[in-house]
Image (cartoon, grey):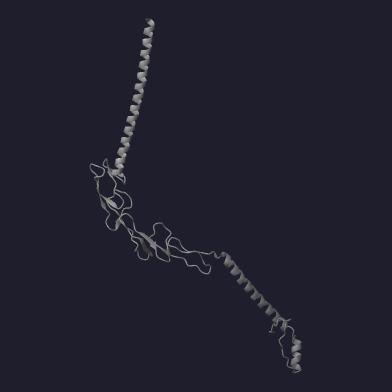
Amino acid sequence: MASDSNKFTGKFFTFLLFTSQVSLAYSSRSLLTDGKVTQHAVKGLFRNRRQMCPDGTYYYEGRTCCLCGAGLRLESHCSVKPNDGQCELCDPGTYSSDPNFQLFCEPCTSCEHPNANLELVEPCTSARNAKCGCKKGHYCDTETCTLCHPCQECGTEGVKVACTGTNNTICNDIGGNGAIIGGVIALIVAILILAGLLSFYFCRRRRRRFSPSQESAAQTNGTATEMLPLSVGRTGVAAC
């Protein structure tokens, strides 16, 4: 009888242990499922908000309002819902290139400044500013161009990089060619100076061949002495 009682007690405790494990497993699964549902609900809330405000949101007096898209400006803030604010298209001559909550759009850039050498490349729209460029023969190397400068002109050295609307002309380096030309000119000048000195030297030497005594004797005898040109070797240098 005692053995039957012990068997019953053991089976009872085994049953309790089994039911407790099943209960714990079910509770854990329920919690995990609830967590997923909650997570999906939060994600859905943000997704709905993004769909409601495709250009983003801003805060005004504690409320979350939708931004106005590019090309629009804010007319009135939201009151109850994020998307019940009012946006208006930018007026002609103005633009907004990014989502905003500004009451006024930016004025378009003008390309008609006097003496600025600018011309219109892309017209202004409600969502994009006008784009100016340089006229032919001028350049501007800044991102926002308000003044174009005349392109540099190269001389005999030649053009290395041609002038464009965004960079000036780059001329070839005159250091190498200039040195060669200068050396040739200096050599020619030196040769001319040397030739002049040699001519002067030979002229002086020929004059000294006739001494004063020979000249007086020629005058006493009444003999006319004619000085004929002499030649030095075969160079044909005329007498002075």
Q: Is 86 left or right of 20, judged from the image as shown?
A: left
Q: Is 97 left or right of 224, judged from the image as shown?
A: left
Whether residue 58 is visible: no
Quadrant showing the N terminus: top left
The answer to which quarter of the image holds residue 90 is bottom left
Quick check: 33 above or below 171? above
Give the image location of residue 136, x and y in percent. 41, 66
Give the image location of residue 77, x and y in percent. 25, 46
Which residue is the extreme one toward the top?
A: 1
The answer to which quarter of the image holds residue 62 is top left
Quadrant showing the C terminus: bottom right
Point 60% across, 68% down: residue? 180
Quick check: 137 above or below 36? below
Give the image location of residue 53, x and y in percent. 29, 44
Q: Nearer the viewer, residue 31 or 15?
A: 15
Point 32% across, 35% down: residue? 40
Give the image location of residue 98, x and y in percent. 33, 50
Whether residue 20 is visible: yes
Point 36% across, 16% down: residue? 15
Q: Nearer the viewer, residue 194 or 15?
A: 15
